[in-house]
Image (tube, rainbow, N blue to C red):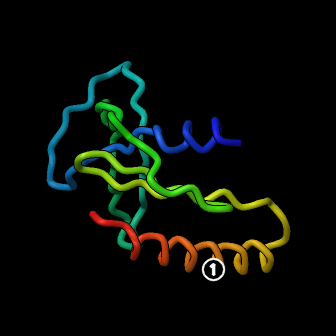
Amino acid sequence: MADVVKELAGIEMPEYSEDEKFKLEVGVTYKGSFKLKENGQITVRPYKEGTKPGQLRKVVDGDQHAIFESKNLLRIVFTIPKTNMDQIKNRFREEFFECYKDLCDLQL
């Protein structure tokens, strides 16, 4: 379980700017997401290659959550068993408050 949490904490989070312009080339496959607005406008958000957050260290290891910290980043990972939706929501709410208490105790 600890390896899974560490792997989840190291996932790269893409950064983007909605005002940023990019050029699409014919025949190239792009990764990203698209959103179709009600007026028919399509918003494209391309994924960008970036750097993985380095030097993450675990500062809190809760029952179903972990908090990692680096120089410029605070990452929170929740691990909740997959059950029915009501149980998931209740478990998340409980873990969220436990995580909130842990955040209040941290010296950032």
Q: Nearer the viewer, residue 87 or 103?
A: 103
Within-10-Å neighbours for mark 1: few <14, some 14–19, many 20+: few
Q: In the rendered view, does 50 fall on the left or right side of 36?
A: left
Q: Give the percent coordinates (x, y) of residue 7.
A: 56, 36
| Quarter-of-image position of residue 77 | bottom right
Looking at the picture, does residue 2 appear above or below residue 67? Answer: above
Q: Residue at x 66, y 57 (%)?
A: 79
Amino acid carrying mark 1 in the image: Arg
Q: In the rendered view, does 1 fall on the left or right side of 45?
A: right
Q: Residue at x 42, y 61 (%)?
A: 36
Q: Residue at x 84, y 65 (%)?
A: 83
Q: Give the percent coordinates (x, y) of residue 35.
A: 42, 58
Which quarter of the rendering shows the C terminus?
A: bottom left
Q: In terms of secondary structure, where does tag 1 sit?
A: helix
| Quarter-of-image position of residue 64 | bottom right
Q: Residue furthest top?
A: 27
Q: Give the percent coordinates (x, y) of residue 58.
A: 47, 47
Q: Nearer the viewer, residue 80 or 35?
A: 80
Q: In the rendered view, does 31 fall on the left or right side of 8?
A: left
Q: Nearer the viewer, residue 97 or 43?
A: 97
Q: Give the percent coordinates (x, y) of residue 91.
A: 72, 74
Which quarter of the rendering shows the N terminus?
A: top right
Q: Which residue is mark 1?
A: 93
Looking at the picture, does residue 52 appear above or below residue 39? Answer: above
Q: Residue at x 43, y 47 (%)?
A: 33
Count of numbered marks: 1
Looking at the picture, does residue 37 appear above or below residue 57? Answer: below
Q: In the rendered view, does 4 fall on the left or right side of 26?
A: right
